[in-house]
Amino acid sequence: FLPQLVERTTVLVQVVQVRGYDLTLPRWWQTPYWFRYIGRVVGVLPIVTIPLLVNALRNTSVLAMVVDARAFGAYPRRTSLHVHRITVADVIGWLLLIALTAAVIILNVLHIANRQV
């Protein structure tokens, strides 16, 4: 369901751009343009969200038939999913991920190791 939603959103944004709406994102230092950009995005929201909502409502009936055909809810235990307990390795992994993300952001903000084209 989600990949179809992302694909349809991409197509609708392309349709909006073909119609002549300017949705180019201003650079972070161009703060006066941000308010105009937000206004343009808010103006385009109905053009994108209404077809997405209509299409999602159409697909719910098909999804309901698929769920019924696969007999979801027929038995109390239909899956082998186990609850994952958080271990020390999980905490270390999350801390490493956060540290790496922070390092990349800091290097990007300070323009360290940026390629000059």
Image (cartoon, rainbow, N blue to C red):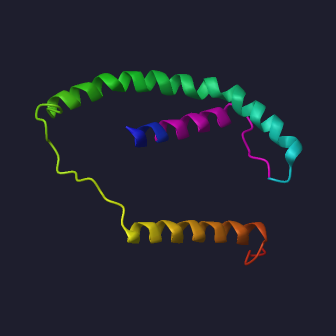
Residue at the (86%, 46%) spot, across then down: 31
State the image quarter where residue 68 is shown. Answer: top left
Q: Which residues are magenta?
A: 7-27
Residue at the (26%, 25%) spot, across then down: 64
- List x then y, in percent, for residue 1: 37, 37
The reply to whether the magenta stretch includes residue 112 is no
Of the pair 90 and 13, the residue shown nearer to us: 90
- List x then y, in percent, for residue 34: 81, 41
> Position of 2 compared to 102: left or right?
left
Q: Is residue 50 above or below residue 71?
A: above
Residue at the (78%, 72%) spot, across then down: 111
State the image quarter where residue 107 is shown. Answer: bottom right
Of the pair 48 and 82, the residue shown nearer to us: 82
Q: Quadrant of the C terminus?
A: bottom right
State the image quarter where residue 29 is shown. Answer: bottom right
Q: Is residue 2 above or below residue 52?
A: below
Residue at the (39%, 70%) spot, across then down: 88
Asked whether the viewer can see residue 20, the reply is no
> Position of 83 compared to 10: left or right?
left
> Position of 108 compared to 100: left or right?
right
Residue sticking out furthest to the bottom: 113
Asked whether the viewer can see residue 65, the reply is yes
Residue sticking out furthest to the left: 75
Of the pair 55 and 38, the residue shown nearer to us: 38
- List x then y, in percent, for residue 90: 40, 66
Residue sticking out furthest to the right: 32
The reply to whether the magenta stretch includes residue 22 is yes
